[in-house]
Amino acid sequence: MGNQSISKPELLEFIPKPSRLPAVPVDGFIGRLKKHLFSNIWNTLLTVSVFTLLFMLIKPFLDWAIFDAVWSASNRRECLNASPDGACWPGVIQWFNGLIYGRYPNDQQWRINLGFGLGILWLVPLAFKRVEQKILIALSAITLFPFLANFLFLGGSDNQFNYIVACVGLAYLLILYINIGLIYLDRKILGEYLEPLIGRFYQRRAALLGRLLCWLTVTVLLAFLFQNLTLLLVEVDSWGGLFLTLIISGFSIVMALPIGILLALGRRSHMPVFRWLSICTIELVRSVPLITVLFMSVTMLPLFFPNTMELNKLVQVLVAVCVFAGAYMAETVRGGLQGIPPGQFEAAKSVGLGYWYTMAFIILPQALRAMIPNIVTSFISLFKDTTLVSIIGLFDIMLMARNISIDKNWLGLHTEPLIAISILFFIFCYSMSQYSHRLEKKLKNK
């Protein structure tokens, strides 16, 4: 055996593959079209077929809406005489102010513009990178801005509580923008200038007390500055148009998430009373359409209040829509909670966190981040469903559009107002969808 030679395995010869040809860059608009739409015969046939079908569908609409449309007329008869096959847009143009503001007085509509402008200004700092405590800014917008907006929109001389809270909110907004300017100038914020003075008397909470004292000072100054301001009382019955639609949908969207979170946590609770109460609320509301909930709120909600208390129809609608949206949001949140691994709960217990701390700082942030697409979808559906309030007599944008068709000058004008409303709703819904996509990407990169 010692004389037998051990055969060695032959080494495989490495034969390199030939180098691949360099990629040919496709530059320019023509190159991208050729790559994506006309890369082969089947792709070319499919592209031609799709564009032919789109042309056949879109061309009649463009002819009716733009090329054969009438843009200047005093009544619908003039539109029919000028172009019987085209759209009649002068009726929409003449009623456009009503579609936006409803029956709100024309000379008072600046209050609506100012209110929504302040609301936008309140949310703009959330996009600044150097601004801290963005959660606090969002919570202040949710808690203080409704009172400021209600003071502007409603008016009246006996609205002292809303006036005081409006001054508090306006002072917060003013201090917020002053502090943003100081931050970008690399200087101390307003409250920090008062901190050394307060620190002489109370060192422990000097920073917080300095900010509160600054806030209180600006609030008092604004209250004295606007003490003679008198806004004309505009009853809620005069609110309407897109303005009313935004109020109902905006308030409902803001309240839907906390209501949904409470119902979802209640449904998962180990306490039978809270669990069954949440289950009954969710299942009862989800088993009936929104229009039924609206009618029930208008007819049954006043029965739970004293006869001396008169509820306006807007309050009843807000309660109904918030409960309806909260019930659907509860199931969305519950799906996100079920997607959290059990190890997260066990890890929170191991470090001594209680139930509410665990939910607030560990579980809910993860669940809500995963459910952003579903949450935004629910918000978009809610925004569109608020048009049902026109059935119970609120002059939202849909009911104002119907009023165009019964105007003696524009009798029978149905299609054009609906097209205009569709464009407005598309702008809002598409903006919400794009914002959710950006928010998903931003959270995913963190």
Image (spheres, rainbow, N blue to C red):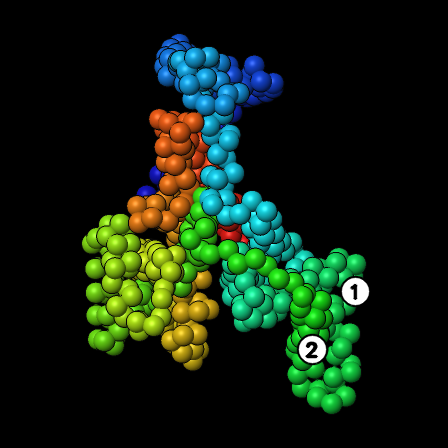
The Cα–Cα distance between marks 2 and 1, rounded to whole angstroms, is 19 Å
Going from N to C along the chain, the mark reached first, 2 or 1, is: 1
Q: Would residue 69 be found to the left or right of residue 187 on screen? A: left
**Residue located beneath label 1 in the image:** 187
Which residue is most to the front? 408
**Residue located beneath label 2 in the image:** 213
Of 408 and 296, nearer the camera is 408
Residue in the picture at 56% in, 57% down: 232
Of 427 and 242, nearer the camera is 242
The three-letter code of the residue at mark 1 reads Arg
Q: Quadrant of residue 56?
A: top left
Residue in the picture at 50% in, 35% down: 96
Residue in the picture at 23% in, 70% down: 277
- Quarter of the rendering occupied by the N terminus: top left
Relative to 441, residue 350 above or below: below
- Quarter of the rendering occupied by the C terminus: bottom right
Q: Residue 117: x and y, percent?
A: 60, 50
Of 442 and 429, nearer the camera is 429
Relative to 368, residue 171 above or below: below
Element assignment for label 2: helix
Q: Quadrant of residue 194?
A: bottom right
Q: Residue 372: x and y, percent?
A: 42, 51
Q: Residue 47: x and y, percent?
A: 41, 15
